[in-house]
Image (cartoon, grey):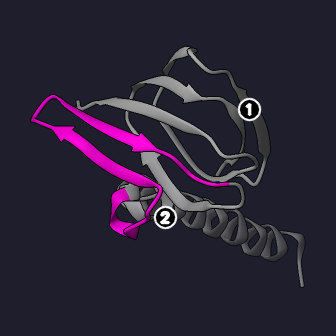
Amino acid sequence: MGVGHLFHNLRGVVNMDKVVALTVSILLLSCPAVFGQDAMQYGLKHLTVIAEDNKVRVLRYAPHKGDTTPVHSHPSAVVYVLKGGRVKYTMPDGSTKISELKTGEALIRPPVTHSDEALDDVEAILIEIKQ
């Protein structure tokens, strides 16, 4: 096999890698399931809609220690903590973060996709801003 033939085959592999990468990128950008869904679809006892209109949705998040929420997404939101405690968040890349929510704290959060687990009993109000 000559060098030219080998180079041609190698170029085909590189081109195939580009096609695969492009295809995966398109799927990730066009498929909401990859990024997470609306958490309300899971019917969780610890997450309820308090109010909703075409601009905002107000949620009550009140898990007990050990309660989990599968992968889901939030738009930009304001969070007001009624009862502080720790929550473990897992991001789509597998990284984790433990947040200590403090009673009376108000947080402004950017859009996010994650799953979560309550490490303590907590309670918060989320005001999601619809785009």
**Pick the front one: 101 or 28:** 101
- Residue type highlighted by circle 1: Ser
Residue 36 part of the magenta-drawn span: no
- Judge from the rendering whether residue 117 lies leftward or rightward of residue 127; answer left or right: right
**Pick the front one: 58 or 2:** 58
Q: How many marks?
A: 2
- Judge from the rendering whether residue 81 lies leftward or rightward of residue 4; answer left or right: left
Alpha carbon separation for disc pair 1 and 2: 35 Å
Is 76 drawn above or below residue 68 in the view shown? above
Q: Residue at x 71, y 71 (%)?
A: 13
Is 46 drawn above or below residue 53 in the view shown? below
Can see residue 95? Answer: yes
The label number, if any, that marks residue 23 in the structure image: 2
Residue 42 part of the magenta-drawn span: yes
* Quadrant of the rendered image containing residue 2: bottom right
In which quadrant is the C terminus drawn?
top left
Q: Residues within 10 Å of mark 2 (few under 14, many from 20)?
A: few
Say which residue label 1 marks: 99
Q: Which residues are magenta?
A: 40-64
Whichever of callouts 1 and 2 sits on the residue coming sooner in the sequence is 2
- Judge from the rendering whether residue 2 lies leftward or rightward of residue 53; answer left or right: right
Is 78 drawn above or below residue 123 in the view shown? above
Q: Residues within 10 Å of mark 1 (few under 14, many from 20)?
A: few
What is the x, y in percent for residue 63? 57, 52
What is the x, y in percent for residue 23? 49, 64
